[in-house]
């Protein structure tokens, strides 16, 4: 799937290219054509799925397709978000994706002076990103006109309800054009009864979009990082699988060659493994997958390309033998486990060379992942290894067999037990 097939204009495609995006995320490929057709959308998607571009890109296009008559510049699109941070983030996306378009946008939220916001609104704004409270302040001061809204987006609607914004939302709805007179897009990570009721009130015959849980706020996925010397990754992996008797493990490598080599090495360690990647014939791939699903093969070593279409339900363990180059692929990989409410575990083996990739992933997830230092690893001062706090994350934590022997032969060497290798913590 490519962005070029979605019906977006050249100016928008250029901005996407400049961001380095090569293909749309699932929520984008689903939402963009629907929004471009002018339909309402009810989408189940979380942060990390690319939902912001999913609504921003077609919104920008709709506004440019239907230019305004005359000089007056009423607000034409309103994006409501629950937090200031999210408003700022969405505002940045609107700017970025719309940089080649003749549209003006503004972000308004509380906690900062209102006067610059008023000045900006007065100069003319097409797209307004706002938190509900401050928007209502502007409404009551008559510094914003919402009577011409063509597109309304409620981002993270579930959080908006959780944060007690329902009354504010009702007030805002009361002054917007009727739902038949505007296009409404509602994004929510969950569909509680309250969200369904809100959707009934706000949306006009919406198309439903659901994307697989992609981000790691999925409580069902326990994530752990093992900081480990590159040369000890395979040993650690074999140990984890053996010691914890993991029956079905999907392991990701970065290269096809790496996948083959690792599958061979695991075989030599007495573990049944198959490799699956783009250089394998379709027959070999189908066979490997069937063997993995049936339990004949315990470990499937895959590259990202091969893993994309894999459909394996209730996979208990995912291991990143190497981190992916693109942080979004991390989310995609670990989303293979913890599906449909089942518990899952995602372990990443990270060596010094991969610190930047790890930081990029944490930035994307907007949180730090719990880290353990494995014996023999040379700690990098820029990475903080944190003790693992809860029992869930501790489950299945692992040390290689010779954990008490550091590389220099010193038991309990400086990189070994000083921080966070888990030995003194309750299991
Ligand atoms: P969101 O779920 O909207 O918060 O987006 C999560 C992250 O994905 C943001 O950092 C975006 O810049 C990034 N992103 C959005 N769409 C794409 C894409 N098609 N390819 C790569 N990265 C993307």
Image (tube, rainbow, N blue to C red):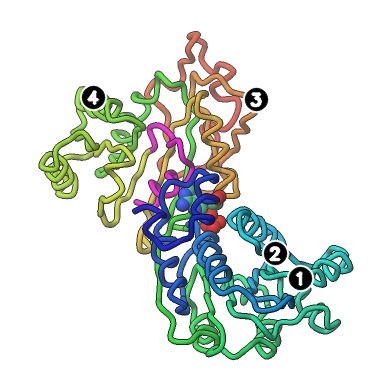
Alpha carbon distance from label 4 to label 3: 33 Å
Q: Nearer the viewer, mark 1 or mark 3?
A: 1
- Residue 124 is labelled as 1
Above or below residue 230? Residue 166 is below
Closer to the chain start, of discs 2 and 1, is 2
The residue that mark 4 highlights is 269
Residue range in magenta is 320-336
Q: Nearer the viewer, mark 2 or mark 3?
A: 2
Marks 4 & 2, CB-CB < 8 Å contact: no
Residue at screen point 68% across, 63% down: 87
Looking at the image, residue 337 sits to the left or right of residue 115; the answer is left
Closer to the chain start, of discs 4 and 2, is 2
Say if disc 1 is inside 8 Å of ligand 1: no
- Residue 396 horizontal/vertical position (percent): 40, 41
Q: Nearer the viewer, mark 1 or mark 4?
A: 1
Marks 1 & 3, CB-CB < 8 Å contact: no
Above or below residue 20? Residue 216 is below
The residue that mark 2 highlights is 104
How packed mark 1 is, by other alpha carbons closer than 10 Å (few <14, some 14-19, many 20 or more), is some
Q: How many marks?
A: 4
Q: Does the magenta-highlighted stretch encompass residue 334?
A: yes
Closer to the chain start, of discs 2 and 3, is 2
The residue that mark 3 highlights is 381
Alpha carbon distance from label 1 to label 4: 67 Å
Residue at screen point 27% across, 57% down: 313
Q: Residue furthest top?
A: 408
């Amino acid at each position: 799937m490519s962005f070029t097939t979605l019906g977006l204009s050249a100016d928008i495609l250029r901005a996407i290219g400049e961001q380095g995006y090569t293909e749309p995320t699932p929520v984008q490929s689903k939402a963009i054509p629907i929004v471009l057709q002018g339909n309402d959308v009810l989408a189940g998607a979380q942060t990390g799925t690319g939902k912001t571009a999913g609504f921003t890109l077609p919104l920008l296009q709709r506004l440019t397709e239907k230019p305004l008559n005359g000089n007056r510049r009423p607000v034409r699109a309103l994006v409501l978000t629950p937090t200031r941070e999210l408003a700022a983030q969405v505002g940045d996306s609107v700017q970025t994706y719309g940089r080649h378009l003749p549209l003006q946008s503004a972000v308004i939220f509380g906690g900062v002076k209102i006067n610059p916001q008023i000045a900006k609104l007065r100069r003319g704004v097409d797209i307004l990103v706002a938190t509900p409270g401050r928007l209502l302040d502007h409404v009551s001061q008559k510094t914003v006109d919402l009577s011409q809204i063509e597109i309304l987006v409620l981002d993270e609607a579930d959080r908006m309800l959780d944060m007690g914004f329902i009354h504010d939302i009702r007030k805002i709805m009361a002054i917007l054009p009727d739902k038949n007179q505007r296009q409404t897009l509602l994004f929510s990570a969950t569909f509680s009864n309250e969200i369904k009721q809100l959707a009934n009130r706000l949306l006009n015959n919406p198309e439903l979009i659901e994307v697989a849980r992609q981000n790691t706020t999925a409580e069902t996925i326990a994530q752990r990082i093992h900081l480990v010397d590159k040369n000890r990754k395979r040993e650690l992996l074999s140990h984890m699988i053996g010691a914890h008797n993991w029956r079905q493990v999907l392991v990701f490598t970065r290269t096809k060659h790496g996948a083959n080599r690792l599958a061979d090495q695991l075989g030599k360690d007495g573990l049944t493994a198959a490799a699956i990647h783009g250089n394998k014939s379709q027959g070999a791939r189908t066979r490997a997958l069937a063997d993995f699903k049936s339990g004949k093969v315990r470990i499937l070593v895959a590259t990202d390309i091969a893993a994309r279409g894999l459909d394996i339900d209730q996979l208990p363990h995912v291991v990143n033998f190497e981190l992916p180059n693109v942080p979004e692929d991390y989310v995609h990989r670990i989303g293979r486990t913890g599906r449909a409410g089942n518990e899952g575990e995602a372990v990443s083996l990270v060596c010094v060379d991969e610190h930047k990739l790890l930081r990029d992933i944490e930035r994307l997830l907007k949180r730090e992942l719990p880290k353990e230092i494995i014996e023999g690893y040379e700690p990098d001062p820029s990475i903080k290894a944190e003790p693992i706090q809860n029992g869930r994350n501790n489950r299945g934590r692992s040390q290689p067999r010779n954990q008490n022997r550091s590389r220099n032969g010193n038991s309990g060497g400086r990189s070994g037990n000083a921080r966070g290798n888990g030995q003194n913590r309750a299991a």
